[in-house]
Amino acid sequence: MTEAGLTMLNRTADSVARATPEPLARKVRGISDKGLAWLFISPTILLLLAINIFPLFWAIYLSFTNYRANRPNEVVKNVGLANYKRILGDQDIWIAMQTTAHFVFWTILLQTLIGFTLAWLIDRKFRGHAFWTTIILVPMMLSPAVVGNFWRFLYEPQIGLFAYAISFVSGIPPTDIQMLSSVSLAPWSIIIVDTWMWTPYVMLICLAGLRSIPEYIYEAAEVDRASNWRQFWSITLPMALPFIMLAVLFRGIENFKMFDMVNLLTGGGPGSTTEVASITLKRQAFESWRTGYSSAFAIILFVAVFGLANIYVKALNKVKQR
Amino acid sequence: MKSTLKLTLGLASAMLASTAVSNVAYAEDLTLCWAAWDPANALVELSKDFTKESGIGMKFEFVPWTNYADRFLNELNSKGKLCDLIIGDSQWIGGSAENGHYVKLNDFFDKEKISMDDFVPATVVGYSEWPKNTPNYWALPAMGDVVGWTYRKDWFSRPELQKEFKEKYGWDLAAPTTFDQLKQIAEFFQKREIDGKTVYGASIYTERGSEGITMGAMDVLYSFGFKYENPDKPYEMEGFVNSDKSVKGLEFYKALYDCCTPPGASNSYMGEGVDAFKSGQVAMHMNFAFTWPGLQKDENVGGDKIGYFANPKGPDGGQFAQLGGQGISVVSYSDKQESALKYIKWFANKDVQAKWWSLGGFSCLNAVVKDPNFPSSQPYAQTFLDSMAIVKDFWAEPSYAPLLQASQKRFHDYVVAGQGSAKDALDGLVKDWTSVFQDDGKM
């Protein structure tokens, strides 16, 4: 464990010790307050080590081997960086990463735009705004399994309401609107569902940001005769920006590892059109049983998300300090 | 008051009795693992006789097809003790034998005088042997299955449709005997109005996630001349997997998908196929034979309305069909192997096999399927026999999973997504499969 980590643990132990009532501390003879605190927090630390830290290090170890979980009797060989080299040179992996990037970009863009607009409208506190807030939040409260299944029915070209609605507007026969079967439409079918489901989440965070802006700033702007447009660009947006960025961070991390919705709606198809990185990873790990290879892929994904998130958090901090 | 008391006491007794019945304790309980489908229900019914005879209770762990391989291969790989008996897919046999998941049954068969000569040869090779075509047995053939076709006999027999078809194609509308005929029929029915409803030509396998499109495409490719490897040089695939004949076969499958399937049928496997046929959407339906008893009984499309035919011939007259089905094995991690072997001995019995067929299971025992009354025992019995005589199976190597994943991707990319050509798909498949066998040290 690093020195910083130990210092943090000691601090935690100290704060727990300070919080322990005096009589209880006296009752446990032979154990110092600090020891007692360690005793209390050690199960949690052990649990964290067992279910978080150990699997991470184990996966790193496996990523340098040819281990396959379905061949328990086979000798495990160290293959060095071979798995990493193979992944970075695998065209299918790069296509999956591009698909993931496409999905992350469009979902975040749409969710942020629509989410912020909804938050801004709700913040106007019009009559019945509480009711509409609740209605808007409903998709977010549903289970992804339920959402995936009912959207699959909605997208059905023969019986789906979505196809009929589009047909009504465009005049295209509903059986020609094959959202999940068409190479060009399938990625958008997932983006639509994800946007429908998670825009309320972005809206909530943005709403918190908008509500945190003190009223007197707007009053001062009114006194200075700033137009609504000017107020929006000079007060609302800059002051809500840290919240918007936070929502983007959360949704970005979530969508980078998106699995459930894609699996339920298209299973990665048609062909490999919607095969995002997590689907490829699952196929390699649990269908092809290339455990070493998939561990290396998981580590690469982890480093990528961790690295990007770190850069982003630094940018977020800069915005907050302004 | 008295009657209320009586009623309460009666209900309480009934509840107690029902609890007692459901918790009957046996000296030992065996757990049998299989897929959740119609034949599994028939096996539950059949196994009651085993419990009666042996005093050994039976528990069942059935998992839907979509999770069947994931769930049970995980169980076997982790040396789990959940399953004492397992009816594993035919492609698992290589891996399960080499990784020590299954008990080798040769000594047991010798001791109990169970002869593999008593079973349909294709099922012995497909479900029991590893390495293939050697007398090393890891399972008893349990559930014969093969891809075949059902069709709407009532539509085919309509005079106005027969007349129109004859005028258009020059031959009588009937169950096809070649793939060319099958496509013509599918085109004829595509988007046709029948009884005020738009219907489509055929339902075929296109599923991406597990094994669907591979089973469907291979079912066609075999008859066009596809071979997995050079018969004289194992694992040499260049010129066999991607031969001109194979390319034509894959092009045919894509053409069939493009011209004649219902809208949105881009991820269709066994369940979706049954739904399409039962709902009266399609004139023909590709599916494993296990679906036939259920369809035969269906009020809307079964009875006299349904017909069956074996996989048609390819352009050169080759006629093959994709093998399905499974053998029953004893799991080597089970603590109840002796009782599990008793179950296998009981299951191999002729009378039990005859009852298995009558309940909806597909027996592989010669004594059952070669019985003179067998072809007339069910409307689909003859088609089942014809189909079982022409089967071929996918790789059953220990690396079958990555081999299958590669074909799923290559076939779906070409057939459904329309990316590249059939030649590109099959060349890519040779490359992927070569890489898998090289990793295994077999090339």
Image (spheres, rainbow, N blue to C red):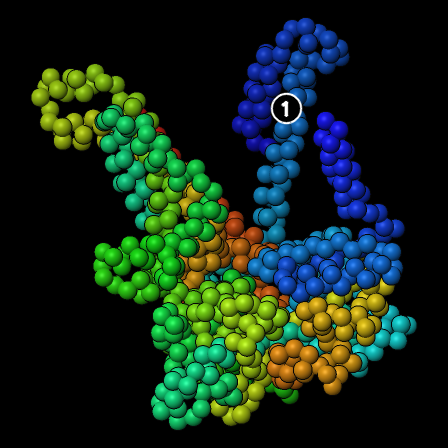
Q: Quadrant of the N terminus of chain A?
A: top right
* Left or right: where A167 falls relative to B362: left
Residue B229 position, x and y percent, is 59, 82
Q: Quadrant of the C terminus of chain A?
A: top left
Camera-side residue of B173 and A294: B173
Residue type at mark 1 is Ile
Residue B247 position, x and y percent, is 46, 83
Q: Residue placed farthest to the right in the image?
A: B111
- Label 1: state its secondary structure: helix
* Left or right: where B22 falls relative to A38: right
Disc 1 target residue: A41
The answer to whether residue A69 of the structure is visible from this angle is: no
Place residue A166 in its image quadrant.
bottom left
Q: Residue placed farthest to the front in the image?
A: B2
The answer to whether residue B186 of the structure is visible from this angle is: yes
* Left or right: where A28 falls relative to B305: right
Task: Write the residue at 51% across / 93% down.
Answer: B316
Camera-side residue of A272 and B24: B24
Task: Write the residue at 43% across / 69% down.
Answer: B281
Residue B258 higher or lower than A12, as above or below = below
Task: Write the residue at 39% across / 78% down.
Answer: B189
Residue B437 higher or lower than B239, as above or below = above
Task: Write the residue at 17% across / 17% down.
Answer: A219
Residue B440 position, x and y percent, is 64, 69
Residue B404 position, x and y percent, is 56, 68
Q: Chain of mark 1?
A: A
Place residue A66 in its image quadrant.
bottom right
Q: Count of labels shown? A: 1
Place residue A187 in its image quadrant.
bottom left
Mark 1: few/some/many CA within 10 Å (<14, 14-19, 20+): some
